[in-house]
Amino acid sequence: NRFAIAVDVRFSKTYLMLADFSGQQLALETYDTIFSIPAFVKDLASRIRRMAKNNGFLANCEGIGVVVPGMVDQRTGRILNAPALGWTGVDIRDRIVAATGLPVHIENSARACALAQLWLERGDSRPQSFAYVSISDGVGVGIVVNGELLRGHDQIAGEFGHLALNVDGPRCMCGAKGCWEAYSSNLAILSNYFGWNLSKLSPKALQDSEQDPFTILGLIERARGGDAKAIAAIESSARFLGLGLAMIVNAINPDCIYLSGEITTAWDMIEGMVRKGLGERALTEAAARTPLLLTPTQDYPRLKGAAALIAAPTFAAPRVA
C-alpha cells in the first residue's frame, strides 16, 4: 500500500507512471514534453492530481521521482545541464514540491536506471561493478563500482555520451562535435535516416509526412521490411554504439554492461556490429568479451529508475559515492 510517482522526461515525450514499491506499474500516461519550466510543472501537477483521483493513491504516495537526460545535482535538485531539454542551471524540484505537496527527488536518467538495477537485483550473484547504458533520445551512462553508484565531485560522473568519438563528427545537441550521443542515440539514428541537423532538431521533426509520430521503432520496422537506408542508418549507429562501449570497458572495466532502449529490440540485427565496434577499441581480448545484458524495453527501466529514487532508500539502498 505504498506508492511512488515516476516521471521520465525526454526530448520527444514525457512518461508518467504510478508504481508500487516492488516497481510494479499500476498506471501509465505519455504526453508531449513541455519545455517551459513553469508550464511543465503546472501540467505535471495537474496530471498527478488526475491520476491520484482516478487511482485513489495520494494518501499512500511516498513521493515523486523525476529523471532527466542531463547532469543533475541530486543533493539540491538542480538540473545543471540538460542540453536536449534546454534546461541549464534550473531548479524544478522545489517547484514540483510546491505544486504537489509531495517529496520530490531528481536524478539523471541513466544513474537512476543503475540505482534501480541495484534495488531490484539482489543476492550474491548481483554484479558489484557495472555500467548501465540507456539509449534513448540521448545516450546516458550510470556507473556502479564495488556496489557504489558513482556521482562524482560535481555530480557529473558517467557523461560518456558527450565524449567525442570524432572531433570533426556531427554536431551534438550539446553544441560539441562528434559526441557518442550524436552517433548512437535514437535522435541521431533518425537524423541520419532523414537528413536532419541533430543540433537544431525540434520535436516537430519527429512527425512523418502524415503527421503521425515517427519513432525509432518505426525505423526498425522499415529496416525489417528491407528499407536499405534504414538498415544502413541502424548498422552505422550500432558500430558507434560498440565504439562507445569500448570507452567504458577501457575506463572502468566493469563486470558487465546493461543496455536499455528501443534500439535493443533490433539486437538480432545489430549485435554483430556492436561487438565489432567494441572489439576495435577494447584494449584487451577479455575487455572485448565484456558481457552485454539487455533490459527489456517493455519494463520501462527509466521509470523504474525514477520509482527507485523514492522506494530504494526504504530498503537500505547501497551507498552512493
Image (cartoon, rainbow, N blue to C red):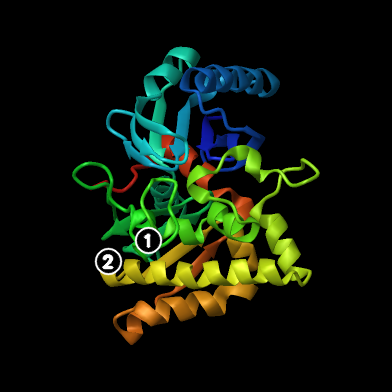
304 or 276: nearer the viewer: 276
The amino acid type, in three-letter code, at marker 2 is Ile
Q: Is residue 317 visible?
A: yes
Q: State the residue at coordinates (60%, 66%).
A: 233
**Inter-mark Cα distance, 2 to 1:** 9 Å
- Hey, which quadrant is residue 221 in on the image? bottom right
Q: Quadrant of the N terminus?
A: top right
The amino acid type, in three-letter code, at marker 1 is Ala
Residue lying furthest bottom: 285
Give left or right: position of 33 versus 307: right
Q: Position of residue 152 (x, y in %)?
A: 22, 47
Badge number at residue 246: none
Q: State the residue at coordinates (46%, 41%).
A: 84
Q: Is residue 22 visible?
A: no
> If you read the primary sequence from the N terminus, does the residue marked by circle 2 or circle 1 appear first?
1
Q: Is residue 61 above or below residue 209?
A: above
Q: Which residue is mark 1?
A: 131
Badge number at residue 252: 2
Q: Secondary structure at mark 2?
A: helix
Give left or right: position of 193 versus 77: right
48 or 40: nearer the viewer: 40
Q: Secondary structure at mark 1?
A: strand
Q: Position of residue 17 (x, y in %)?
A: 59, 35
Q: Is residue 268 above or below residue 265?
A: below
125 or 87: nearer the viewer: 87
Give left or right: position of 130 versus 25: left
